[in-house]
Image (spheres, rainbow, N blue to C red):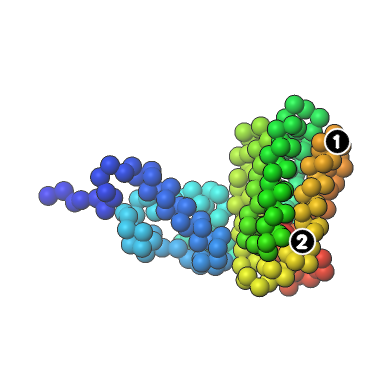
């Protein structure tokens, strides 16, 4: 007698893998699965009510994204981000996003890019005024993702996918609601204005000044995140 699949008939295995992946991704980003947590296929399959196949696929995708790390003979873990990791993630982001700025500025891509990014900045400002810090961080990441998307470079987007996922791991250091509020409120005006400055400089066709503003923005983010790890720093913001 054939063994029945735990997956309901008519729902593709691919769909289960995507659903499981989204749940695990959310748990990592929200701190439900803190850095250093080990993930077990059997336990995850049982908790999600699916077979091990979709779970295995989901874990592999998240490993490729950088949200999980596979350690030989040990298993799969949520990475623990070091100060060096944080610096390296933002180094890669600076290279990729600077390339996006230069590719967009002074081209026909600028008008639609400005329209999309301006909307995100205004959303960030609204969330900041409402002290909705989770949305502030979400809109911040939306801005940088939108910047790279506007460059219309599939390879740039593909490389960016990994580093933005690792950025989410870095921002997991700000999971405590009170501490997150404290970090953001100290620089809330600057946070919105720095994003505004980047797109206004791009619209003025000053790509190098826009890249310099982007670099300053990232430098502040690195200071904040390293401070969380006890590496020192005085100015606070996210990015």
In-front residue for pair 189/47:
189
- Residue at 67% from the left image edge and 68% from the top image edge: 180
In-front residue for pair 27/115:
115
- Residue at 26% from the left image edge and 53% from the top image edge: 6
Q: Is mark 2 on a helix, strand or loop?
A: helix
Q: Quadrant of the C terminus?
A: bottom right
In-front residue for pair 102/63:
102
The answer to whether 92 appears left or right of 13 in the picture is right
Residue 215 in view of the camera: no
- Residue at 72% from the left image edge and 54% from the top image edge: 125
Residue 233 drawn at (x, y percent): 81, 68
- Residue 150 is drawn in which quadrant? top right
Give the farthest residue toward the left. Answer: 1
Q: Is mark 1 on a helix, strand or loop?
A: loop
| Mark 1 and mark 2: Cα distance apart in space | 25 Å
Residue 62 drawn at (x, y percent): 51, 52
Q: Mark 1 points at which residue?
A: 204
Residue 205 drawn at (x, y percent): 85, 34
Decide: marks 1, 2 in contact (CB < 8 A)?
no
Residue 112 drawn at (x, y percent): 70, 33
Residue 29 in view of the camera: yes
The answer to whether 100 appears left or right of 42 in the picture is right
- Residue at 77% from the left image edge and 61% from the top image edge: 188
Q: How many marks?
A: 2
Disc 1 crowd, CA 10 A, few/some/many (<14, 14-19, 20+): few
Q: Mark 2 points at which residue?
A: 188
């Amino acid at each position: 007698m054939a063994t029945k699949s735990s997956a309901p008939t008519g729902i593709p295995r691919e769909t289960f893998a995507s659903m499981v992946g989204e749940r695990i991704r959310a748990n990592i980003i929200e701190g439900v699965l803190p850095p250093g947590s080990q993930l077990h296929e059997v336990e995850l399959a049982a908790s999600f009510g699916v077979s091990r196949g979709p779970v295995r696929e989901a874990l592999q995708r998240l490993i490729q994204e950088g949200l999980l790390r596979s350690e030989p003979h040990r298993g799969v873990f949520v990475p623990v981000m070091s100060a060096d990791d944080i610096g390296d993630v933002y180094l890669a982001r600076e290279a990729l996003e600077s390339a996006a700025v230069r590719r967009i500025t002074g081209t026909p891509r600028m008008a639609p890019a400005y329209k999309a990014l301006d909307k995100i900045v205004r959303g960030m400002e609204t969330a900041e005024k409402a002290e909705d810090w989770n949305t502030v961080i979400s809109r911040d990441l939306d801005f940088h993702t939108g910047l790279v998307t506007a460059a219309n470079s599939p390879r740039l987007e593909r490389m960016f996918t990994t580093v933005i996922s690792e950025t989410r791991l870095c921002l997991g250091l700000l999971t405590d609601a009170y501490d997150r509020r404290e970090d953001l409120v100290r620089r809330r005006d600057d946070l919105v204005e720095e994003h505004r400055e980047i797109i206004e400089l791009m619209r003025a066709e000053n790509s190098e000044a826009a890249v310099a503003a982007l670099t300053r923005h990232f430098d502040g983010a690195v200071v904040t995140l390293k401070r969380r790890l006890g590496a020192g720093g005085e100015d606070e913001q996210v990015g």
